[in-house]
Amino acid sequence: MLYDNLVKPSLSAITQIAQEWLFQLGGIIMFLGSAVYWTVKPPYRVQEIFRQLDFVGAQSVTLIAMTGAFTGMVSALQGYNGMSRYGAESLVGATTALALARELGPVLTGLMIVGRVGSAMTAELGSMRNTQQIDALESMAVAPIQYLVSPRIVAATLTLPFLSAVFGFSGMIGAYIISTKYLNIDAGAFMSGIRDYLTANDIVQGIIKAFVFGFMLSLVACFKGYYADGGARGVGVATTQSVVLSSVLILFSDYVMTTIMF
């Protein structure tokens, strides 16, 4: 009797959670199919795409550059702390460059864009859904996904690799300043380590990751906002779910891609 009272509710809860996740997965796949269809179908919303490119990319450059610079500084300090124990201080530049190009650049850029852009996308679309603006577009024979969703996904997907490059560049500037001015590492040794160990393949891997992260976070943000309901509270819940799910997906997909590219 005790076994039945404890196990059956647990199995029921697990089954319900699994069903909810499968329902969400199916909804996202169907939503993705609609977004792809309306992206390639004319008329093309070029003006809206450029507006989203400005919002996702140009307006995020300062944030990404500042975050990258501090990340590079911290990476140099931590790298020096470990390398100095083995007399390999000259490799601080190489290890920092590899970390920024392959992991820290695309991952932290994705997480910062989730917080700044993904949440805004979800909140904006959720507000439009709850104020019936999306229904108004449908009544005017305008495809809401083509007008609202596709430009956001295209803009985020195209922009993330460039923002990741900005992150890595500013991070290396920060690491160079800290290494040469504070840690007294020879500038020539710092740069030669980067030339010897950083390859084009490392940079390409980071670009591929950023491309995937941009696509995923924009898809999740638009999906959660497009189907948000329940008024202001529902928009808040959808925004929270969007940020959490996007962040988890970025970290999970980073591990999968790193395993494949290793």
Image (tube, rainbow, N blue to C red):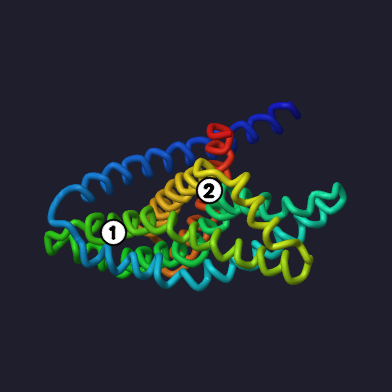
In-front residue for pair 110/122: 110
Hey, which residue is sitting farthest front in the picture? 188
Is residue 186 or residue 240 the one in the foreground? 186
Instruction: Tell me: residue 25, above or below residue 107.
Output: above
Residue 195 image position (x, y, % from top left) = 59, 49
Left-right relation of 13 to 242: right
Q: Are marks 1 and 2 in contact (CB under 8 Å)?
A: no
- Give the secondary structure at mark 2: helix
Q: Horizontally, is 25 left or right of 187 in the view?
A: left
Q: Which residue is mark 2?
A: 250
Is 132 in front, or is 120? 120
- Three-letter amino acid code at the position of disc 1: Pro
Residue 52 in picture, x, y percent from top left? 32, 66
Quadrant of the image occupied by residue 111: bottom right
Q: From the top left corner, tell me how far across and down residue 173 is, in percent.
A: 60, 66
Residue 214 badge: none
Q: Residue at x 58, y 34 (%)?
A: 262
Identify the amino acid type marked 2: Ile
Is 2 placed above or below 239 here? above
Other-residue count near label 2 (Cα within 10 Å), few / some / many at <14 / 14–19 / ≥20: many
Secondary structure beneath dot 1 equals helix
Pointer 1: what residue? 151
Residue 14 visible, this angle: yes
Q: Is residue 237 visible?
A: no
Dividing the picture into quarters, in which one does residue 256 lie?
A: top right
> Separation of disc 1 and disc 2 at Cα?
21 Å
Residue positioned 31% across, 41% down in the render: 30
Q: Residue at x 19, y 56 (%)?
A: 143
Q: Position of residue 188 (x, y in %)?
A: 67, 59
Return the disc, 1 or 2, that comes first in the chain's sequence.
1
Q: Residue at x 36, y 40 (%)?
A: 29
